Amino acid sequence: MNVKYQNLFGDSLTSQQIVELSDYSKISFKNNNVKIIEYYSLTISGMSTVVSYFMDTEEAKQDILDKYCDPIKHVKCTLLFNKQQIGRYHLWKWEDYSVDKICTHKGEKVYDEKHRTLFSNEIDIRSDTLKSAQKYYHGNVYSGEFADTLLGFNYNSDGSVKYIFDTHEKYGYIRGITLDEFLEDTEFSQELFPWEQHPYFHSAYPFLPEGDL
């Protein structure tokens, strides 16, 4: 599998650069698709690792957990499975597992063709209801995912907009604002980011985009 490295902001790194870093990710590709992402982070107790594994339909969860989860090496695992696709967007279910292979959280994520996160949610592990959700709007200017994220949208458990975040203060906001505050700023909501032209962000639903963002 081909491999590349990134820092926390999604900027590319060389294999020489990661030696000097305490936090980075290693991304392995299979047939040009992301297969495994290993997130490395130096903590007080040593190096901690989270392995995100994108499953094929023929693979078994237990086999992957047995291979990667490790309490001695502090390795946790996130499994992504049941891939659905509409156009260039992909929806995955995800489950977080502890070093002891116990499922601790679950939800869904949507990635675009550049493997940037467009949507993420968390589902209550007991009631199977929506706890929270986020969507992200990208500027398609920078290669790094964080640098290219213009806006972040947080949603309540009923799917309504909770806060809108101006990620890099491009629109003049240093904190999250409510939907009412956003709409009251007519330059922002009618000219810079015309709200009626971006229905995907009006609610946490639908998860998968059905058209342009």
Image (spheres, grey):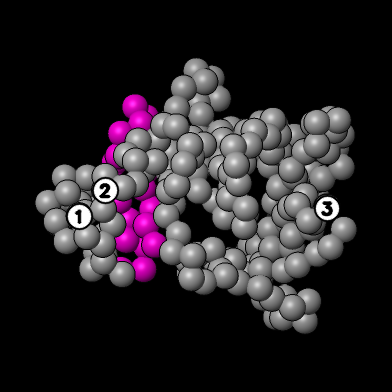
* Residue 164 magenta-highlighted: yes
Horizontal side of residue 2 vs 145, given as left or right: right
Residue type for callout 2: Trp
Residue 63 place in picture, x, y as percent: 87, 34
* Residue 16 magenta-highlighted: no
Residue type for callout 3: Asn
Magenta residues, start to end: 150-169
Q: Is residue 39 visible in this depiction of the protein?
A: yes
Residue 82 place in picture, x, y as percent: 69, 30
Residue denoted by label 3: 31
| Rendered residue at 78%/76% (across/down) | 15
- Is residue 186 shown above or below 12? above
Residue denoted by label 2: 195
Among all residues in the image, which is located at the extreme top?
127
- Is residue 77 shown above or below 108? below
Residue 143 image-quadrant placement:
bottom right
On the rendered image, what quadrant is the N terminus found in?
Answer: bottom right
Give the mark count. 3
Element class at badge 3: loop
| Rendered residue at 62%/53% (across/down) | 113
Residue 149 place in picture, x, y as percent: 45, 62
User: Do residues under tags 3 and 2 come within 8 Å of each other at their CB atoms?
Assistant: no
- Is residue 88 shown above or below 16? above
Callout 3 crowding tier (Cα within 10 Å): few <14, some 14–19, many ≥20: few
Element class at badge 2: helix
Residue denoted by label 1: 190
Query: N-terminal of the two: label 3 or label 2?
Result: 3
Element class at badge 1: helix
- Given residues 61 and 41, the one toward you in this image is 61
